[in-house]
Image (cartoon, rainbow, N blue to C red):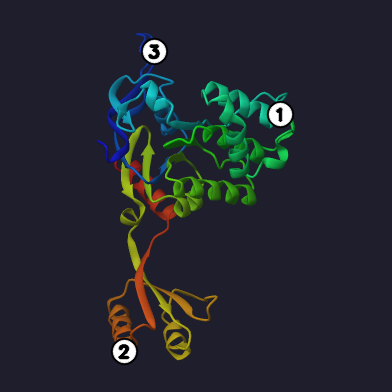
Amino acid sequence: MDDYVIQTENLSKVYGWLFWKKSVPSLNNLNLLIPKGSVFGFLGPNGAGKTTTIKLLMDLIRPTTGSATLLGKPIGDIETKRKIGFLPDAPAFSPYLKAYEFLNICAKLLRIPSNERKKRIEEVLLAVRMTEHAKSKLGGFSRGMIQRIGIAQAILNKPELLILDEPLVGLDPHGRQELKDIIFEQKSAGTNVFFCSHILSDVERICDHIGVLSKGNLLCSGPLHELLSEVGERVNISPGNEEIAKDLMTDAASSHRLNNGGWELVFQNNKKISERLNKLKEANPGGITITPSRENLENFFFRLIEKNEKGR
């Protein structure tokens, strides 16, 4: 159990238990193991049960059946809650408070000692690139700025586990990149990150583990590189091997020049081409690197959802 930051066992939530209402299963026997040291992306269509899962983990609602542990302790454990940072979907803060005032209130609620609050607030404002807006009122902030302040309050207590519900929604590309950088920095600092998102391209760049949920059922979960199927081979050709690159380009599905002057070529699965590439690699040790080329997360996601729908 100590190897997992989040563990659920047959976790379920059914709404509508009164006899004149039809029961609606929002989450059905969720069994999830999220290893420590990971950035976990929780994916699924609207209404899949992602937010319900987060509410259960945060002890905001109670499960119908099943159980879960966070950081090795049952959900609801007071000491564990102090080690968790949380940003809900579409956070709403008082528009009349200044950023620093809001974070100071949060720091008091988190029982951060008074002699440490100022330093910690300054640290998180710097981490989310909002230092210059410390004295500005939240009511004048854009969606991206509110998201960053939301993350600032979520990391005030230096959490071991950071739970974010759709943190990238509504942001422009620049805002998304800044939030991705913040998530990377949190991982580097030793924080475990669990978040939901519909932006699959960003999830693919950020996460090392994912889970896919559909209509309350977990379709798959595991390391991203193990879930994505191999669809061919990716070949890196070092500078000085122009003739080899040109010779291979006619059979490549795609190719582009690297900043160092070398080339990257992608080939679809083909036994004859694989044999040819291996022979070239043997003849040019150090000049050619071959790695598996995998399907992207978007293709995997829609293939999985479609397969599940057809199987019903």
Q: Quadrant of residue 57?
A: top left
Q: Nearer the viewer, mark 3 or mark 2?
A: 2
Q: Residue furthest top?
A: 19
Comes first in the chain, label 1 or label 3 = 3
Which residue is under mark 1?
98
Q: For residue 312, say whether it is visible.
A: no
Disc 3 on helix, strand or loop? loop
Q: Quadrant of residue 95?
A: top right
User: Marks 3/2: CA distance?
Assistant: 71 Å
Which residue is under mark 2?
283
Which residue is under mark 3?
21
Residue 177 is left or right of residue 14, and the answer is right
Comes first in the chain, label 2 or label 1 = 1
User: Marks 1/3: CA distance?
Assistant: 45 Å
**Residue 217, placed above or below residue 78:** below
Q: Nearer the viewer, mark 1 or mark 3?
A: 1
Q: For residue 228, say whether it is visible.
A: yes
Q: Residue at x 58, y 31 (%)?
A: 90
Q: Quadrant of residue 170?
A: top right
Q: Quadrant of the N terminus?
A: top left
Q: How dense is the environment of label 2, judged by Cα within 10 Å: few (below 14), some, or many (20 and up)?
A: few
Q: Residue at x 54, y 49 (%)?
A: 180
Q: Residue furthest front?
A: 115
Q: Quadrant of the C terminus?
A: top left
User: Marks 2/1: CA distance?
Assistant: 65 Å
